[in-house]
Image (cartoon, rainbow, N blue to C red):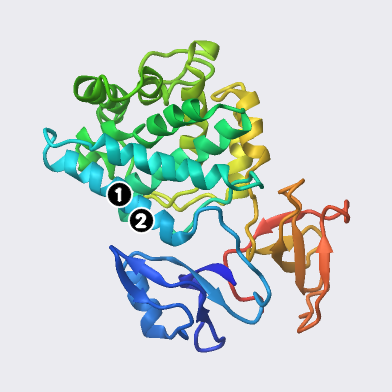
Amino acid sequence: MRLVNINYIDVDKYEYYLGRTVSSEGVVLLKQGVKLNENYVKQLNLKGIHYIYVIDEVSEGIEIKEVISPDKYFKMKDVVKDQFNKVKKNVNIGLNMNIINNTVDDILTMLTSNKDIYLSINEMRNMDDYLYEHSLNVAISCLYTGILLKYDKMKLHKLAVGALLHDVGKLFIDPKVLNKPSNLTIEERKEIEKHPELGYRFISDNYGNQIQPQSKQIILQHHEKWNGSGYPNQLSGERIYEMARICCICDAFDALTSKRVYRNPMPIYLASEYIYSLGNIEFDFEIAKLFLSKIVRFKEGSIVKLSDGSKGIVYSQNKSALDRPIIKLLVSKEGYSIGHKNIFIDLLEEKTLFIEKQLESTILD
């Protein structure tokens, strides 16, 4: 099984079967095992679903293991969406903190019950649900980082609540400005940069006793930068609350790897390099290195080009070196198809080889 961009699926030339059921707004669109055709692909595109799991010839034998299953992930996203929409419709109704706390506890239980601490980024995203998916993804990433920092359960809960609500202030920004597909004016940029203070004020005024001060500081400070170039208060270095420094990294990473109205998502391996390059400039370098050490750069099922010109599919991960997975060879360095031969390259052992880039196309002709 592998995750593919449906824009590169050629159902006339190859056979694809749906690897996992696809749902939207709680409604099943296509069931697992269905053979894909041109109409199915068109309808998924119209629904804003651009990535799906498929089973095909090249992905035979590949298992994609996730700490949080797609079903559970989308249920939690719907909870966040419902809570945020209630605030948008009527600020006096607001958030149900019991539901928010239960969602955080569910995420924490799933992550802490897993022995292998590494983060495989969810790429099955709906651009229309960006704010809700982004909030959930940042909370998950922050929890991973907090676990690596050996935070206790109470501290992890405070971190996750703040991360889940870090962008709540965007609910009070004009959507036309927030979702503008072209460059922002200086005034529009200033408007968006108000969201940490708007979120902090909303939470403090309405949930002062229900949300811990540490969580509120995450909301206020998550756009402060290590070198003092951030906002709203141009804090720098260790003057920025540690949990906010974590959220800053996770927020930037998820934004880079998400599709926006004004740009396509950055591949995970490139986003990782970008975050690393800004360590001690925008980000706390020690936390950034820890976070990136457990990021899966190339997910199982990804088609990649190696430094010798050969191409293959990521078969499994080397958990001690997540940037050097095991590759199943598909095309030789001379450009010949390997066919049905099972030739595997362990990049942990083949020191002279490395992944040059991930290929978006699913076709290897």
Where residue 179 sits, quadrant-wise, is top left
Quadrant of the snapshot with the N terminus: bottom right
Badge 2: how crowded within 10 Å, few (<14), some, or many (20+)?
A: some
Towards the viewer: 355 or 172: 172
Q: At label 2, which amino acid type do we have?
A: Lys
Q: At label 1, which amino acid type do we have?
A: Val
- The residue that label 2 is drawn on is 75
Quadrant of the snapshot with the C terminus: bottom right
What whole-number distance in Å separates the C-alpha atoms at marks 2 and 1?
6 Å
Instruction: Using residue 129 as the reference point, say whether residue 247 is left or right of it.
Output: right
Badge 1: how crowded within 10 Å, few (<14), some, or many (20+)?
A: some
Towards the viewer: 141 or 193: 141
Residue at disc 2, secondary structure: helix
Where residue 205 sits, quadrant-wise, is top left
Residue 129 tag number: none
- The residue that label 1 is drawn on is 79
Give the vertical position of 59 relative to 93 (above or below).
below
Residue at disc 1, secondary structure: helix
Residue under the image location 59 percent in, 29 percent down: 278
Residue most extreme to the bottom? 12
Q: Is residue 279 visible?
A: no
Q: Position of residue 116 (x, y in %)?
A: 66, 47
Q: Position of residue 9 (x, y in %)?
A: 51, 77
Instruction: Using residue 197 as the reference point, say whether residue 270 is left or right of it.
Output: right
Check contact, mark 2 vs mark 1: CB within 8 A. Answer: yes
Give the vertical position of 172 relative to 283 (above or below).
below
